[in-house]
Image (tube, rainbow, N blue to C red):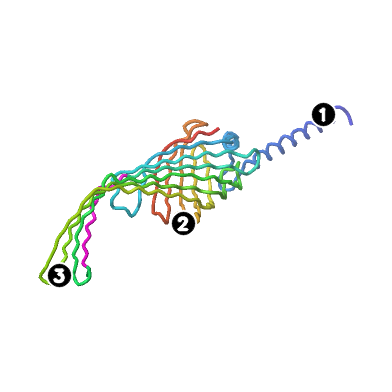
């Protein structure tokens, strides 16, 4: 075979090799129903090894008629464990509630020896506040960590503490009767009630993340075991966001606890590194 024929054969092989490499590159970035993911999008997903999120906003108790004002905040730190599908996830929360001043009126009638006692009293509660705070540590397994759609599961421990305080003043008037005799007396005073409690529980989560650059979305459901002697409950949450830069995203989130009937609606930011 002469030189020109050898050159023709080598040129043909080089062309076929180049076409095969191009085809393989396209297929590796293809997801059914989405189309070809750009190298920039893949690099954006792959390069997020650490993230920090901070959000603040509205907190409330669904069944409370006495909330005056309230607010809540949430923090989240997430770090990848090298090239593994695992992440360490730390989350924190804080909520503060101020309640309206309220009155409790009580009446009672009961026998005492051969007499009868009638009692009426009023208790006023004011400066009533509650704070709750805590956090969790979880190990998260990502099924498609570097893909556009990433389902995941996680498990860990959650800690929570609440503090409650209120001032009160009370007044009570009593009447005791025996046949045609009667006697009355009254008492009043001031007081303060302070309570606090804390507890830990197991938490297991399932969720899914979606990265249609520059947007982000996350849906999540969690199971919490008994805490504060309450029944086990579910925690439902969602986060949506949009990137301002490659390393900064604005977020909106919502969280609801089914047993406590408490919810957060917060806005904030995430730093992606």
Between disc 3 and disc 2, the foreground one is 3
Query: Does the magenta segment cover residue 185?
Result: no
Q: Residue at the far left: name it.
A: 180
Task: Identify which residue, 101 or 3, lies in the foreground.
Answer: 101
Q: CA distance from mark 3 to mark 2?
A: 54 Å
Relative image position of residue 177 (x, y in whole percent): 15, 67
Q: Which stretch is magenta?
A: 98-109
Number of numbered discs: 3
Q: CA distance from mark 3 to mark 1?
A: 126 Å
Is there a contact, CB below 8 Å, between mark 2 and mark 1?
no
SS under mark 1: helix
Image quadrant where residue 46 sits: top right
Q: Which numbered disc, 3 or 2, marks the residue that appears first in the sequence? A: 3
206 up-or-down from 267: above or below: below
For image coordinates 43% across by 38% down, the residue present is: 55
> Mark 2 packing: few (<14 Cα in 10 Å), some, or many (20+)?
some
- Left or right: where 273 falls relative to 117: right
**Magenta segment: does it hold 103?**
yes
Query: Mark 1 = which residue?
Result: 7
Q: Residues within 10 Å of mark 1 (few under 14, many from 20)?
A: few
Which residue occupies 52% across, 41% down?
212
Asked whether 108 or 133 is in front, the reply is: 108
Left or right: 99 as drawn, with respect to 231: left
The secondary element bearing badge 2 is classed as strand
Which residue matches tag 3?
178
* Mark 2 vs 1, N-terminal side: 1
Tell me, for residue 111, which label it has, or none.
none
């Amino acid at each position: 075979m002469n030189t020109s024929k050898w050159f023709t054969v080598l040129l043909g092989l080089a062309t076929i090799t180049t076409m095969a490499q191009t085809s393989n590159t396209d297929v590796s970035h293809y997801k059914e129903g989405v189309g070809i993911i750009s190298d920039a999008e893949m690099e954006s997903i792959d390069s997020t090894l650490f993230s920090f999120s901070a959000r603040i906003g509205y907190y409330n108790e669904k069944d409370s008629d006495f909330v005056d004002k309230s607010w809540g905040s949430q923090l989240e730190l997430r770090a990848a464990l090298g090239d593994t599908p695992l992440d360490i996830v730390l989350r924190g929360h804080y909520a503060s509630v101020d309640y309206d001043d309220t009155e409790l009126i009580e009446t009672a009638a009961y026998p005492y020896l051969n007499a009868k006692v009638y009692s009426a009293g009023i208790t006023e509660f004011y400066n009533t506040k509650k704070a709750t705070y805590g956090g969790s540590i979880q190990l998260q397994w990502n099924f498609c960590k570097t893909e556009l759609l990433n389902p995941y599961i996680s498990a860990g421990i959650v800690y929570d503490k609440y503090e409650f305080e209120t001032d009160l003043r009370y007044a009570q008037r009593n009447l005791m009767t025996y046949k045609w005799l009667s006697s009355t007396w009254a008492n009043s005073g001031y007081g303060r009630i302070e309570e606090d409690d804390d507890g830990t529980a197991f938490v297991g989560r399932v969720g899914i993340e979606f990265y249609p650059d520059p947007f982000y979305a996350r849906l999540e459901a969690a199971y919490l075991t008994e805490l504060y002697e309450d029944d086990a409950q579910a925690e439902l949450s969602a986060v949506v966001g949009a990137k301002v830069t490659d390393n900064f995203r604005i977020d909106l989130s919502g969280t609801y606890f089914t047993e406590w009937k408490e919810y957060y609606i917060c806005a904030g930011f995430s730093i992606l590194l």
